[in-house]
Image (tube, rainbow, N blue to C red):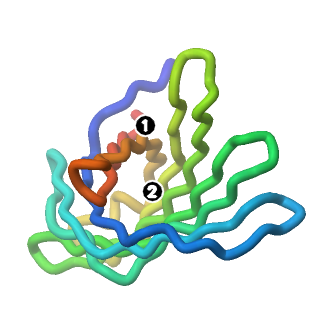
Amino acid sequence: MTPTLELAWEAIVDIAPRRDLGVTPLGERFIIDILGGSFEGPRLKGRVLPGGADRQLLRPDGAKLLDALYEMQTDDGHVLTVHNEVVIDEAAPEGRYARSTVRVAAPSGPYEWLNRRVFVGTLQSLKPERDAVRIGVYLVC
């Protein structure tokens, strides 16, 4: 059976300016603090909590790896931890490639189903209009 995708949620995440963490043998490192935001999907909505961060590695081959860890609070008060690992290739022949794997840690209750599913995502910068990114998260069905 061929998998299909179903929108789980879309988030608008406000971000701080990028900070340089120096160069390693693996590439240049950066960090971007997550300031907050909002998310909404067919089965959940709420706000992105401040305090998370997006650690980035710009590899010598030009690919950028993002490792974001942050929390989202649903409108009914449940806190979900999101781990989003993104690959960005600005030089892809088909245009900018930004795809991710997304893992969710949810407490027992109405959102615990998120712990037992596979999610993939997209990432789009909203600059220069807003210091934010749009993250699309899709359930693999």
- For this view, does 42 lie left or right of residue 87? left
Against 97, residue 86 (above or below) is below
How far across and down, in percent of the image, does residue 130 sit? 23, 55
- The residue sitting at 61% across, 35% down in the picture is 89
C-alpha distance separating marks 1 and 2: 11 Å
Splitting the image into 4 quarters, where does residue 124 fall? Answer: top left
Q: Nearer the viewer, residue 116 or 123?
A: 123
Q: Amino acid at mark 2?
A: Arg
- The residue sitting at 31% across, 49% down in the picture is 127
How far across and down, in percent of the image, does residue 43 sit? 17, 51
Q: Amino acid at mark 1?
A: Val
Q: Nearer the viewer, residue 127 or 57?
A: 127
Task: List the residue tagged with mark 1.
Answer: 140
Check the picture and name the quadrant holding the C terminus. top left
- The residue sitting at 41% across, 44% down in the picture is 123
| Number of numbered discs on residues | 2
How far across and down, in percent of the image, does residue 6 sit? 30, 34
Q: Earlier in the sequence, mark 1 or mark 2?
A: 2
- The residue sitting at 44% across, 50% down in the picture is 117
Residue lying at the far right of the rendered structure? 25
Q: Secondary structure at mark 1?
A: strand
**Badge 1: residue crowd in 10 Å (few <14, some 14–19, many ≥20):** some
Mark linked to residue 11: none
Task: List the residue tagged with mark 2.
Answer: 116
Q: Secondary structure at mark 2?
A: helix
- For this view, does 37 lie left or right of residue 16? left
